[in-house]
Image (cartoon, grey):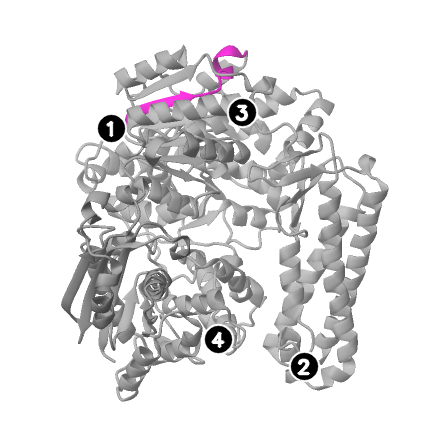
Amino acid sequence: MKRFVVLDLETTGNSAANKDKIMEVGMVVIENDQIVDEFSTMLYPEKPIPPFITKLTGITDDDVKDAPSFSEMADTIVDILKDSYLIAHNVPFDMGFLNAELSAIGKERLYNPVIDTVELTRIFFPQAPGFKLGILAEYLHIEHENPHRALSDAYVTAKLFLKLKAKVSSLPYETLAQLLKIEKVLKSDLYVLLQEEMDRLAFQIDESPYTSYRGLAFKDHSIRKREKLTIESSFGEYLDSIYEENGSMQSEMKRYEKRDGQRTMSEEVYDAFQAKKHALIEAETGTGKSVAYLLPTIFEAVKKNKKILVSTYTTQLQSQLLEEEIPLIQKLVPFPFQVALLKGKQHYISIEKFANELESTSQDNYDIALTKAMILIWLLETDTGDIDELHLPSHGKVFYKRISAESEGQIDPSSPWFKYSFYQKARKRAQQADVIITNHALLCTDIFNDYQFLPKYEKVIIDEAHHLEETASKHYGLKLDYVNIQQVINQLGLLGEGKWIDSIVTSNSAIVDTISPDRWNDLLTLTRYELDDLFRTIFQFVLNQEGSQKGLSDVGRIQYRYEAKAETKKWETVKEMAMRMIFYLRDLIHLLTIVHQQLTDKELVEETEWKTDILQSYIDSLEQLFLLENDAEFVKWIEIEAYGAKNAVYLYCEPVDISNVLKESFFDVKESVILTSATLTMKNSFTFIQKRLGIPKDRLETKKIPSPFSYEKQVCTLIPSDFPDIGYGKTDDFIAATCESILSLAEITNGRMLVLFTSYDMLKKSYYLLKELMENEKFVLIAQGISSGSRERLKKNFQTFEQSILLGTSSFWEGVDIPGDDLSCLVIVRLPFQPPNHPVYEAKSLNMKRNGGNAFYDLALPNAVIRFKQGFGRLIRSNSDRGIVFICDARIMKSSYGKYFTESIPKVPITFDTTRTLMEKAQEWF
């Protein structure tokens, strides 16, 4: 069958089951890889078209009032689809609607072989930025004239399918053979297409451009040797050649604008390197700090022939440095240099583990089959093996943990797999590089494990440095949760389940005599039971607690901090259960040790050691969390998902103060640590961050570099004086006033608004109230935790619609960059104070009081100010940006501490008045 028909439907809603109807049909016919025909028609849906659908498609009730009904056009549609593959961008939707309409008029359902282009693009273009039709059209350079109209969407889908078909033709034989094993679990009927390509390749003797081993094809990625260079110029001459008039920055950058602060920062970084000092540098928005610190870093690393580390908090900034800033600097700098990215082992795929998983497809669910297919194609394209390049389905992330480099333990260098290890290649690149880009998580892991994970370095740049304390605390502490332990226990498997233990027994039959199947199975069953029982009991324990030690996290989990003095009989029961769990884990380790002694296969020996180490780490964590006497230096707490599974429990332990540890393990042993961020000061003072991180004062330089933006002209700050006071139990009144103001402002700014909340609960209440208050769904509401998708996906959706409002909490306060007209209004609902009963804050404040400090002024306020500055910085991202900041919290004007917020941001005009007056001012200003 060589005929393909692409179908696209526009409907009155998303569910045929809810009696939504088809209102437009578009069809495109493909034969011999050419578009040969088209068909389109409007249909009368027999019901009003909702306003949201009209807004999306442009189709109104008037457009369809004289259109034929579906029953009149059904035979024509079915006839076009005869003897064809049915192709759609989300086949279940289009075919489901079509079959529902056919059934409703008594006609036979369609059973054509299908191809789903959403599924196929996920597989064959796994690194695409998204899989909606518009995003794919832009990514693959397909013209999309009329989005959300049936025929236009059908044409784009047809062109997309032809690109997918061409991609299939480019695949090596090994990849096609592996896809064929998976095909039966997928939605698309790909068997014939894949088999035809394999038959064609079977008769070709062309050399493949890919490396192949054990039935798996992947891209060859050899590593170039590093060249040593001698730099003759001085640092001043080097900077002149880049920054000064007619320098490389002016010639290489479009729309270049000289920023004095950028050169100042480069000089500050270099001076700190030469003086072997640490530095805190606050570079406000618009400074261009990434380029500013990279220029002296690269000069110093190449000139001295010593590696320098650059650490960031987010993978987003890592990618930005590697994909945008480094290519720019390669043009600016008059000598070659090498930069390498290094992450933790869990980020890199193990080709060996993946090859083993491909041999077993019998238990694959859809997500696992899709993940395997995506990885097969990705391996032909990736240079890094870094899984962050992929958008895996939810269960695919769980599967990936089984095949990450972290799960392979230590590979023997003599193993054939060693030379194909992405992690080992990343380490080798890092060893040869001048500059290594890493993240705070790996940096802290390295610091607290005697510097064994990163190549040796003496100088380091820490970007987004306001996150260092939090990351260091997490990595010096512990985290334990039910799902992770359960996954490892389940991976071991009962004998006869076809899991890991069966592969061990198959390799050496004598093991069955050493550990009888009954003994192993009984112990594993008891361990599973105890694990489930322990976490269910902890869940109930937290649920039944009352008082100040219980609160809500910013993602809505219930939190409970526990201390030795607060122990009860119920908590004693939890401790006894934890001891039993430890007992069973020790027994498992004992049996695995016996197994280990019997093994001869190197790979199985290494894997057994790795599994034993993990079980021992669980024992250590359980002892630290439950059995050791409570140490005043650590805070321990539990989080539960109240409406989740009854064992959805997370256990945490963190140091109350990490400053001494960082001082002794990091700042005292490194030559020069440069810490930078747009938000390090409170009222122009670095004291707070210096104390929290333990940076020695006698080795510290500080510098504040102001923004080049004209905030006085670009920002109008409005604060209402007449909002209900939330402190007097008027939360609902406050939310109502906030929502009314959001909608009033949205009318003035035409949407294009980001609303920042400090609590998920308030965000959720506001979202549903806004929905209720909004007439005709004029504005598209996008809300974190309610609208589906990652932060990046929600941001892109927000930018897609002309009139949209984005509600965010936690992660939306920073790292979200929406330049230009896409964002004209920023609403800050509450000043971002940490809830007073947050476990870590509570423990830190008690510790401060014990040491004679003021928990509010020395901890809560500085943290809130830094967070506030991050949120405020979302609005102005370039010289041409202009907008309103609306702060709903009057404490910024009425309280004694309000000036700490207003004096920590750039100087902007502030109006504190009634809501009505503010709306008039906003209208006038725009």
Between tags 3 and 1, which lies in front?
Answer: 3
The magenta-colored residue range is 879-895
Label 1 environment density (alpha carbons within 10 Å; few <14, some 14–19, many ≥20): few
User: Mark 4 Cα within 10 Å, few/some/many (few <14, many 20+)?
Assistant: some
**Distance of mark 4 from mark 2, alpha carbons?**
20 Å
Where is 470 relative to 146, above or below? above
Give the image quarter of residue 840: top right
Kind of residue at badge 2: Val
Q: Give the image location of residue 880, x and y in percent.
A: 24, 28
Instruction: Indicate whether residue 485 is drawn in magenta.
Output: no
- Residue 732 disc label: 3
| Marks 4 and 3 in Cβ contact (< 8 Å) | no
Lower sequence index among marks 3 and 2: 2
Decide: is 568 above or below 683: below
Dot placed on the residue nearer the N-terminal end, 4 or 2? 4
Disc 1 to disc 2, C-alpha distance: 68 Å
For label 2, the residue is 505
